[in-house]
Image (spheres, helix red, strand yellow):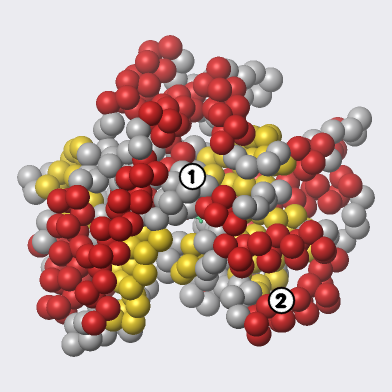
Amino acid sequence: MNTASTLPHLWLPYSQMHTAPFPVEAQATSGSTITLADGRTLIDGIASWWTACHGYNHPSIRRALITQAERMPHVMFGGMVHQPAITLAQRLAARLPGDLERVFFTDSGSVAMEVAAKMAIQYHLNKGHAGRHKLLSFRGGYHGDTLAMMAICDPEEGMHRLFGAALPQQILADLPTTLAHSAALEALLARQGHEIAALIVEPLVQGAGGMLFHTAETLRQLRRLCDSYGILLILDEVFTGFGRTGTFFACEQADITPDIIALSKALTAGTMPLAATVARKTVFEAFLSDNPLHALMHGPTFMANPLACAVANASLDLFDQEPRLEQVRAIHTQMTHELEPCRHLPGVRDVRTLGAIGVVELERLDDPEALKRAFLKEGVWIRPFRRIIYLTPAFTITSDELTHLTGAIKRVLKEHLG
Ligand SMILES: *Cc1c(COP(=O)(O)O)cnc(C)c1O
């Protein structure tokens, strides 16, 4: 078998190039399908890491991109702004809860989270709160691949275990989903709360950690704890933002406002790299002073790229004009119904759904590559990881396409389990 290392020049993510199978080559996309260079067409169950929320090649997204490309593809953002960014910031602020209203643009989820962490640490410095420089995060969490973010990802389950010794020591806890975990978190905060700048969590779903769900009440509890210990609450909605969990932002289901929120993935509907870190008015105000050192010290070269901002605006138009959240509800109902029979297959530990996320969790997954090959044979793009098989389709997927995806999961599991 040809392995990935025989691919000239390219280095693939999270792949042992020596043993990973030679990758398939995508040539074109449309709606919920990907056409490969060898002519096969796959129904996409993942929407390119849950970014392509309106499906691929949506005509109005394409039009926005071309129009902006003809006018101004890019311009630096230092000392200069532009309408696509002004409009997008205003629209994000209007969509977000509470006084989340200051938008800092970057180009990836990891960097948006880096900026969120820097904002939180500097907020306390600017305020003169001494000794608050630690970050508190949770087992099962994933916040990106950069060094500072690796330090707050789940250290055991995560993809970054090897780097442990090279990373800054942060504080890790279990999400307070049980009485024991709540008590442990309370005790930790009583002990170390005064050292903590920010508590960081993916609301409702820990995505890359294995699509682990928790309740809105857990989030409300975290908000209360942050308030009583003077800790900023950072919500990483890089995965959950833009409708994936059934509401436009996941935090709406808990009726809480974080101090800082990070958005990316579906922000441009899977078209361009873009991310946003949005701070509450009170956070922003801590950076206003006569002291130049109180300014936020960050500025990516491609910050607020106009092409990306233009497509993000076009994506928000689609959310305004088309019934995306109803589509998410319909996907949820259909996926719940069609995946439910998997629960009774031998080797299946759990079946769960939330919004347009469907998960079949196995007792164990020894050979994910065999399942990936089986899914390709079924004509679907589904990528099992850890112990889970999951679907995060485009919100525009047709009911027949979705049935094809859930059917493929049932057939492949019947063949490969037990
Ligand atoms: C994907 C993801 C990130 C990292 O985003 P990149 O754009 O890959 O850097 C961070 N947090 C969450 C919750 C994510 O799902």
In the rendered view of the protein, which quadrant contains the C terminus?
bottom left
Label 2 – label 1 distance at C-alpha? 29 Å
Compared to residue 310, the image places residue 17 above or below, namely: below
Q: Residues within 10 Å of mark 2 (few under 14, many from 20)?
A: many
Please indicate, yes or no, whether residue 360 appears anywhere in the rendered image. yes
Is residue 336 or residue 369 the one in the foreground?
A: 336
Compared to residue 32, the image places residue 222 above or below, namely: below
Measured as percent of width and height from the top left, residue 393 is found at: 30, 51
Please indicate, yes or no, whether residue 168 appears anywhere in the rendered image. no
Horizontal arrangement in the rendering, residue 216 relative to residue 11 (left or right): right
Figure quadrant of residue 363: bottom left
Figure quadrant of residue 300: top right
In the rendered view of the protein, which quadrant contains the N terminus?
bottom left
Is residue 9 or residue 25 the one in the foreground?
A: 25
Measured as percent of width and height from the top left, residue 278 is found at: 64, 40
Q: Residues within 10 Å of mark 1 (few under 14, many from 20)?
A: some
Which three-letter amino acid code belongs to the residue tagged 2? Leu
Q: Which residue is mark 2?
A: 185
Earlier sequence position, callout 2 versus callout 1:
2
Q: Secondary structure at mark 1?
A: loop
Residue reaching furthest to the left = 39
Horizontal arrangement in the rendering, residue 386 relative to residue 305 (left or right): left
Q: Secondary structure at mark 2?
A: helix
Q: Please tell me which residue is depicted at 59% across the width and 22% down the height of the picture.
A: 86
Q: Which residue is mark 1?
A: 248
Residue mark closest to the camera, 2 vs 1: 1
Horizontal arrangement in the rendering, residue 304 relative to residue 372 (left or right): right
Q: Please tell me which residue is depicted at 30% across the width and 68% down the height of the picture.
A: 389
Q: Please tell me which residue is depicted at 87% across the width and 45% down the height of the picture.
A: 126
